[in-house]
Image: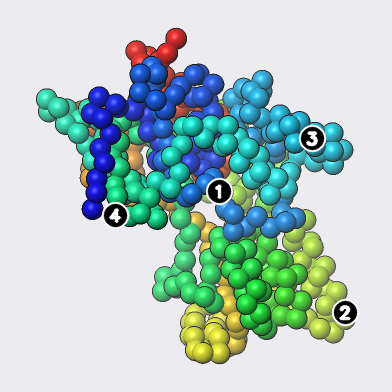
Amino acid sequence: MTTLHSDPDSIYDVLGLGFGPSHLALAIALHEHGVSPHQGAGFRVGFLERQPRFGWHRGMLIDDATMQVSFLKDLVTMRDPTSDFSFLCYLRERGRLVDFLNQKTLFPLRIEFHDYFEWAAARVEHLVEYAAEVVSVKPVTEDGEVRWFDVASRDPAAPERLTVRRTRTLCVATGLEPHLPPGAARSDRVWHNSELLPRVDRLTRSGTPVRRAVVLGAGQSAAEAVDYLHRTFPEAEICSVFAKYGYTPADDSPFANRIFDPEAVDLYFGAPAEVKQSLHDYHRSTNYSVVDMELIESLSRTMYQEKVQGRQRLRMLNVSRIREVASDADGLRVTVEFLPTGQRQELDCDLIVYATGYQPRGIGDHLGEIAKLCLRDEEDQLRVGRDHRVETAAHVRAEIYLQGGTEHTHGLTSTLLSTTAVRAGEICSSLLAQNAGSLRK
């Protein structure tokens, strides 16, 4: 294996791990302060991303799916409404500003918002190294203090070659990873909803028939997967399995939505642990395992129309759980239990889609031994400051910032787009304050 080390005198002030919307917003904020990826530029910044290009939930970019947050909660507007990285500036450049306004909506198509992200990412691509998968982070000690971190990365297409970069500060935003139920394993017939579109495309190109598909989950992604499969395979039966009695509408009412206000983060951060827990429990319905009312009503109408027509392809197996999945050469056999009675039925199907959400990657998953330098509270959760900086042992002078994985300290918006711009501004301000001597005036 070949290992390439950057020049020891060439040290990054900030190195970001991952380049999704959170770090894109941070890159823009830093770019607007005149940072550079180059040595000797005064304040050196870089981001590492394992994907070969920018991409955000590409597997769920269903053609007619819309965003669930306002376009004003884009990458910059809540931080700086005058920034030319806003969604409105994107629309103006694309020649669709008037057309969008005529739609009278706050919620763009998801494919359009993804195109906006790509447009913004292209403007700061000088700060990003794509196809750079981080494989290790190690502390660098001098005079008994941890002064820097060495970050080793590799190109997934050339794994035998490692590149090591040294940085004074890490910012971690490696996102969430798909969650599957215990015992479930992906295969050609068993998917997580995050890979829905490419899997369906591969299936249709191969001409493989789909007679029945099962979707497990009760949230927005599950309902969207059910609707998409129902439309894509007009001869197939689509079975939606979930433990609830019915889909729960998302609470996007004005007062409930205040939990996503920037001020709510301040209140949450300073609240006692029991208050944080109660706020989380009270307002889970704004985000977790809920579905937009418009989609609920559309699916209900479809089911009723099929009953009237005498051919029901869309089935809701509510108050139920999948108990067993067996596979053979002909497909899958899924055992579904109706929870009130314990009665079980077996479904022969061609595919299963697990729309069972995501889970944060533990800091040890991508920082290794660095995680041991981070302080934890009584609940074994990371101690994180209001500026999103991880508290570390006394001998650690190098800094670690988190974007995501801070729901226990900063509330429900930790992994959501709602405060992305504001959070990026807070981290940017903290970084520049910590590195005031390096900032180019």
Q: Looking at the rendered structure, which numbered label has been put on residue 55?
A: 1
Seen in the picture, residue 378 relative to 184 is either above or below; the reply is: above
Q: Position of residue 385 (x, y in %)?
A: 38, 30
> Label 2, on which residue?
308
SS of the residue at dot 2?
A: helix
Tag 2: amino acid:
Val
Number of marks in the image? 4
Tag 3: amino acid:
Gly
Mark positioned earlier in the residue sequence (3 or 4): 3
SS of the residue at dot 1?
A: loop
SS of the residue at dot 4?
A: strand
Residue ID at (52%, 46%)? 53
Q: Nearer the viewer, mark 2 or mark 1?
A: 1
Evaluate if marks 2 and 1 touch, with contact meaning CB atoms under 8 Å apart. no
Mark positioned earlier in the residue sequence (2 or 1): 1
**Residue furthest toward the left?**
143
> Label 4, on which residue?
160
Side of 61 where 390 appears, left or right: left
As measured in the structure, the alpha-carbon distance from the residue carrying label 2 to the one carrying label 3 is 45 Å
Evaluate if marks 4 and 2 touch, with contact meaning CB atoms under 8 Å apart. no
> How crowded is the residue under tag 1: few (<14 C-alpha within 10 Å), some, or many (20+)?
some
> How crowded is the residue under tag 4: few (<14 C-alpha within 10 Å), some, or many (20+)?
few
Side of 260 where 96 appears, left or right: right
Tag 1: amino acid:
Gly
> How crowded is the residue under tag 2: few (<14 C-alpha within 10 Å), some, or many (20+)?
few
Q: Position of residue 200 (x, y in %)?
A: 63, 69
> Label 3, on which residue?
95
